[in-house]
Amino acid sequence: MKLSQNYDYLQAKAEPYAEDILTHDNFLSMQNYYQHGSVSTWQHVLRVAYFALEINRKMHLHCNRRDLVRGALLHDYFLYDWHDHAAELNEHPKLHGFYHPTIALKNAKKDFDLTALECEIIYKHMWPLTLTHVPTKREAWVVSMADKWASFYETIFCR
């Protein structure tokens, strides 16, 4: 399977845990914002959810799959193009990496009922860049690792 192109497959993997997220208008709007190279934020979070499920499965971590997937899908729910420094919602354009977890969490809380674990996943996914936001739950660690791997993959292979 060519992972960079098969988003139907990635969405199918996430759907049992997050149909409400996957069909939400704000979530779908993430198709309009670019994350890494030619990869949209929507594509990125689907890939992160898939990688998180695979890390959990291959390492036998026994994560809560529902919270794992939902947190992964919402970890970058900031809803703007972070490359556009003039964007109205981009409050800290040159420090996006440090501030977007807080913005994503605020947006996700507006649109969805989140568990404490989903909140931790969203808020702490940028560790170690956000040094004071150290993950304490295995699901948050897994999404943080999956995000790093997906970002690397997209930056190198999805140009």
Image (cartoon, rainbow, N blue to C red):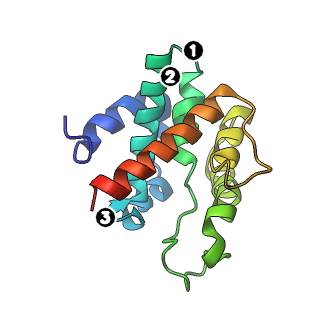
Decide if residue 147 is in sight here: yes
Amino acid carrying mark 2 in the image: Asn
Look at the image and tell me in which quarter the N terminus lies: top left
Determine whether 66 is above or below 89 in the image: above
Decide if residue 22 is in sight here: no
Look at the image and tell me in which quarter the C terminus lies: bottom left
83 relative to 138 in the view: left or right: left
Residue 148 percent across, percent down from the top left = 50, 46
Label whose residue precedes the other's in the sequence (1 or 3) = 3
State the residue at coordinates (57%, 48%). 75
Amino acid carrying mark 3 in the image: Ser
Label whose residue precedes the other's in the sequence (2 or 3) = 3
- Disc 3: which residue: 38
Q: Do the CB atoms of the residues marked 1 and 2 lie less than 8 Å apart?
A: yes
Determine whether 75 is above or below 62 in the image: below
Residue 121 percent across, percent down from the top left = 65, 40
State the residue at coordinates (60%, 81%). 88
- Disc 2: which residue: 56
Crowding around mark 2 (Cα neighbors within 10 Å: few <14, some 14 to 19, many 20+) is many
- Disc 1: which residue: 62
Amino acid carrying mark 1 in the image: His
